[in-house]
Image (cartoon, rainbow, N blue to C red):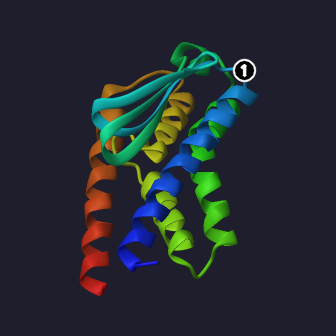
Amino acid sequence: MPLYLNVILSFVVALVVHELGHLLAARACKISVTQVGFGWGPRLYSKRVNSLDCYLRLLPIGAYIRMDMAALQRRSLPQQLVVLLAGIAVNLMFAGVAWGTIFGTVNLALALANLLPLYQQDGWKGGMLICRRALGRRSQMIEWTFTISGAAMSIFLLAVGVITF
């Protein structure tokens, strides 16, 4: 298989199993999931499977699930973290199983990227939960500081990676 095709297929499968991790964790915690999607942009195809709306979109650069956020917020902190970090855990598992392959490398990269406290990434969402729980409330100043410092740290790590590569 050509290298570029291997990388593309590995990325697609890694995205799908990442979101599947979130889906299974949400269902285990009895949080309803209403939508799963692959890609961004205009909808190319949709199908309803049981109570789940499945979407395929034009730009294959991401994937998502849409769950009942109010139900998630009513769960204990450990359950919320399990749901938010399940995708990363699945990617790390596949990275270990497929170590030394392109698929393993793509899964590891996806897991590490999602751990970064970048706005709306899994690591950022988990960090926000922990900050709010530690403070016992929301704090706009702390949340903005966390978000901006997470972005700065991510840019720094990217720069170091590019320079050393």
Tell which residue pokes out farthest to the right in this image.
28
At 45% from the left edge and 60% from the top edge, which residue is drawn?
Answer: 11
Tell which residue pokes out farthest to the bottom in this image.
164
Quick check: 90 left or right of 69?
right
Residue 18: percent from the left, percent from the top?
A: 55, 48
At 50% from the left edge and 75% from the top edge, which residue is drawn?
Answer: 102
Return the residue nearer the eye: 98 or 96: 98
At 40% from the left edge and 49% from the top edge, which residue is drawn?
Answer: 117
Q: Quadrant of residue 141?
A: top left
At 32% from the left edge and 59% from the top edge, which residue is drawn?
Answer: 154
Q: Quadrant of residue 49?
A: top right
Quick check: 158 left or right of 131?
left
Mark 1: give few (<14), some (14-19) or many (20+) Cα within 10 Å. few
Mark 1 — residue? 30
Return the residue nearer the eye: 106 or 49: 49
Give SS at disc 1: loop
The C terminus: image quadrant: bottom left
Return the residue nearer the eye: 46 or 60: 46
Residue 116: percent from the left, percent from the top?
A: 42, 54
Quick check: 62 left or right of 59?
right
Q: Amino acid at mark 1?
A: Lys
Quick check: 88 left or right of 153?
right
Residue 71: percent from the left, percent from the top?
A: 61, 15
Q: Is residue 10 above or below residue 126?
A: below
Q: Is residue 40 above or below residue 111?
A: above
